[in-house]
Amino acid sequence: MNFNFAGTPTLVTQIEQGAPADVFASADTTNMDKLTADGYTSGTSKVFARNQLEIVVAPGNPKGIAGLADLAKPGVIYISEGPTVPAGKYSLQALATAGVKVTPKSLETSVTAVISKIELGEADAGIVYTTDIQAAGSKVQGVQIPAANNVIATYPIVAVKGTKYSDVANAFIDYVLSSTGQSTLATFGFLSAS
Amino acid sequence: MRRERVPIVVLVPAAIGAAFFILPLLGLIVRSPWRDAVTALTAPETVEALKLSLLASLSATAVGLVLGVPLAWMYARVEFPGRDLLRALTTLPMVLPPVVGGIALLLAFGRRGLFGSWLDSTFGITLPFTTAGVVMAETFVAMPFLILTVEAGLRSMDRRYEEAARALGASRWRVFTRVTLPLIGPSLFAGAVLCWARALGEFGATITFAGNFPGVTQTMPLAVYLLLETNHQEASFILSLVLLLISLVVLVGLRDRWLGSA
């Protein structure tokens, strides 16, 4: 298998511009819906994983951030993903349900960009996925967001229309959805598909 | 001027070379939604990004001239140990992936950077996420073009004019401003234009070092990239073409004014 990882909108553009792809895994339903509406998918997409949001801070949490409300504290540099990145969209939703008004210092283009700026100490806090904090290891720390304000991201997967390897593509999707695939995803911090 | 017959071994590769640049441009022009052009161009975010781009790229060129011309003069006129190494170091950003350049700037001038932490603790100045940060990122990536071009101009000029002026009693400053600068005028102009054009299109170092926020650090290339990322590709084509058009107008206009139509 060859993997091509990129931001979801980039992947959609690549597929629509004819990049050879057999399976498409999306970080949100909006982009999956777009690709489906444009006629580039084969069969219906299935949710293969879910993820939740967490506040990312520097190790030791030097600014003492305990929840979403603290992001608006004076002296805290909060950065976000842009509103067009799924994580940025979910962050806005989470902040809205918590009634927190905060203007980010920067609208980064990806979750990884937010995390690397926290690591480098340029910003104090951001909102990312639980799995990203787990992947960053000891370089950052997570602060949980209560379920009432959290947003659950759903990740759908689908075979791309016109693939030469539709058997293998569907077999891979079945594997990801199987209990083996699901437990692998769980070790990276994903919530189960259902 | 006598019209020379162009040998076919020159003409064919030259034509392919030209087509290589023209075809992608044509692609952008053909695929742009011209009906929506006015909406895309008058959007407040576009106007804001364009203003910021012009301000930052011109500032970067000004900084480049102030710091880069003396550096080029040192390289061309002064023998000092480690000169070649220093020249290589100051042209490094030309080959460095700009994103890496942005990280390097953060490590030096960021809030926890080697020099940035001192700036922060002593003066309370932090550069990332500011317009000054954009100018720094653009200068870092663009100034090497100016340095190299001006150095080449200084090396190729006839120094006897300077010597004659000195012999006639002109001060060193007067020789520099009245003889040297006019003589290297074309290289100075070419260097400044290259520097400005590179700064105008700068993306990687800017988004890494200065971040992205409308009106503060979001320049045109950043706005274009974000439109691409949000499935508004067509609007991004228009903005790119505007950026191209502006540079074209400025380049052609300045060229005629400065160098005369040759």
Image (cartoon, coloured by chain):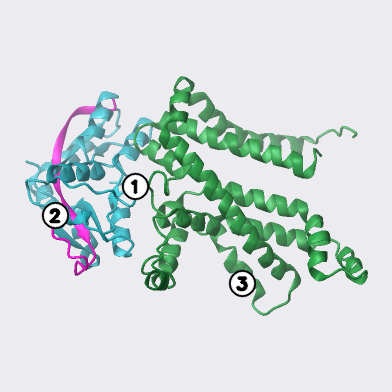
Chain colours: A cyan, B green
Q: Secondary structure at mark 3?
A: helix
Place of residue B208 in the rendered image (x, y in percent of width and height, measured from the top left): 41, 55
Residue indicated by mark 2: A189
Let me know if residue B95 appears in the view: no
Question: Is residue B128 highlighted in magenta?
Answer: no
Determine whether label 2 and label 1 are within 8 Å by CB: no
Image point (13%, 53%), residue name: A184
Image quadrant in which you'd find residue A19: top left
From the viewer's perspective, tell me whether residue B72 is left or right of residue A106.
right
Image point (46%, 41%), residue name: B49
Measured Cα–Cα span from mark 3 to mark 2: 48 Å
Please identify, in this view, whether the residue under mark 2 or under mark 1 is nearer the observer: 1
Residue indicated by mark 1: A109
Image point (70%, 69%), residue name: B75
Residue indicated by mark 3: B86
Let me know if residue B192 appears in the view: yes
Place of residue B132 in the rendered image (x, y in percent of width and height, measured from the top left): 47, 56
Image quadrant in which you'd find residue A133: bottom left
From the viewer's perspective, tell me whether residue B54 is left or right of residue B229.
right
Q: Secondary structure at mark 1?
A: loop
Image point (76%, 44%), residue name: B258
Q: Chain of mark 2?
A: A
Farthest residue toward the top?
B35
Given residues A156 and B250, the one toward you in this image is B250
Chain part drawn in magenta? A39-67
Q: Quarter of the image containing the C terminus of chain A?
A: top left
Q: Which mark is residue B243?
A: none
Farthest residue toward the bottom?
B81
